[in-house]
Structures are given as C-alpha cells and as structure tokens.
Amino acid sequence: DGGITQSPKYLFRKEGQNVTLSCEQNLNHDAMYWYRQDPGQGLRLIYYSQIVNDFQKGDIAEGYSVSREKKESFPLTVTSAQKNPTAFYLCATGDDKRETQYFGPGTRLLVL
Amino acid sequence: SQKIEQNSEALNIQEGKTATLTCNYTNYSPAYLQWYRQDPGRGPVFLLLIRENEKEKRKERLKVTFDTTLKQSLFHITASQPADSATYLCAPGNTGKLIFGQGTTLQVKP
C-alpha cells in the first residue's frame, strides 16, 4: 500500500447518512478503482476512472458515487440508497499498462 | 456471466511442502491472469502476472501456470513457510479490468 492512502481505517454510518471514503495516491497513476469485499466473496468493482474528470460504473455502482477532480484523489461516497453498506472497501491504482493494480490498506465501513 | 472459481476451503500444509492453489474461469477469455496475496485486514499485494501466450512463470519460490484450453491457472509455492500463510486471489484480466476470485486461504504449519 506504499503510495496509496485510504482514510479512515474504520467508518461508522448511521441510517440515512451519506459517508465519504478517501483515497489518495502519489504513484502518478492515471487509473484508479474502487472495490468492495465481503466475506467469502471476491472483490467486486464499484467504479473506476481511467483519467481525470472521467469515471465509469463497475458491476455494483448502485448506491455509490465518485468524483475525479484531481489525478491524486478518487473519493467514494456511500449514499443512503446503499442498503447493505457494511463491507471492506479497497481503493486501487493501475499502472500505464492498465494491468497490475496497487491497493490501499482499505476502509472498513460499519452500520450503527 | 463470467465466473472465477477458487477452492473455498482452506488449504493446510506442513512447512517445507509445496502448496498448489487452483483457479478456474468460465465465460471469459483473459489476455492475462494475475495472482495477489492478501493478509487479514489489509489490501491485496500483486505477486505474478502471466500472459495468455505464456505457459509458465516463475519468481523465486513461486510458479504459475496458465492453460487457456482448460481455462485454468495453478499457483505453486515451493518450500512453503509459515510466513506464506495468507489468502491468495486469482484475477484474470483484459483491457485494464480484473475479475477477482474469492480467494483460497493457505495455512502453513511449522
């Protein structure tokens, strides 16, 4: 997770609340990704961005939103529309070849 | 739909033995396949990438094979050590997108 930071490490959400997960990178990578990981399941892609000011939905985008205003930053907002938000959220970057991905340390989101 | 399958049961082996993990995929033609290691509560770490035109790749005690006919990859750790205990994720990919398996947990006992 060297050049990728995610904060906070743990986040608690109340009913009806939107929360934002931070992801910052200093690897100078254009591509950034958000995944969700649930116990016993593979990582599922929420959103990804190949370049600043552009992003695409992944496989499970409903209830989430993102922005990519700076190359270094790709914040993820979990909205109140996401009914089952409890999971481990991972941010990743992709190198110029768009093959290998580099992951941050993750944020664990819990619902109060 | 695309499906990636890894052994869901944990693999327990004795230190010094070779661990072999399996990854099968269906409805997919990846250009490459990657293996990642994930420790509890942490993000995955890249280990190896093998391309569709490569049969085998090695890195230190790690070896990966890729059979596009069988749609299968095998991941071997030789002379395993307790420090190799972790969950290993298989991730076939194409044009910048990876599809991750659920991972196989390896436990190496001293």
Image: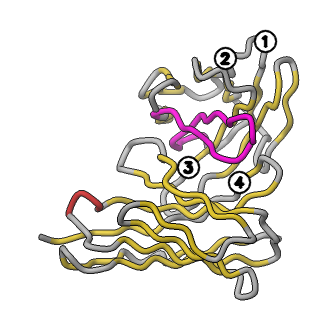
Left or right, residue A56 beside residue A107: right
What is the C-alpha distance between the residues marked 1 and 2?
A: 7 Å
- Reading the image, the residue beneath label 3 is A37
- Residue type at numbered disc 3: Gln
Task: Report the residue at 23% width, 57% height from top.
Answer: B83
Q: CA distance from mark 2 to mark 4?
A: 21 Å
Q: Judging from the image, what secondary structure is the residue with disc 3 in?
A: strand
Q: State the image coordinates of residue B108 (x, y, percent, origin top left).
A: 23, 70
Nearest the eye: A32 or A111: A32
Q: Residues within 10 Å of mark 1 (few under 14, many from 20)?
A: few
Chain letter belonging to callout 3: A
- Residue with the mark numbered 2: A73
Q: Are marks 3 and 2 in contact (CB under 8 Å)?
A: no
Q: Residue A4: within the magenta?
A: no
**Residue A106 vs residue A96: left or right?**
left
Mark 1 sits on what residue?
A69
Which SS class for mark 4?
A: strand
Residue at (42, 27) in percent of width and height? A9
Q: In the rendered structure, which segment of residues is drawn in magenta?
A: A85-105
Q: Label 4 lies in what chain?
A: B
Residue B102 versus residue A12 in the image, above or below: below
Q: Residue at x 74, y 33 (%)?
A: A64
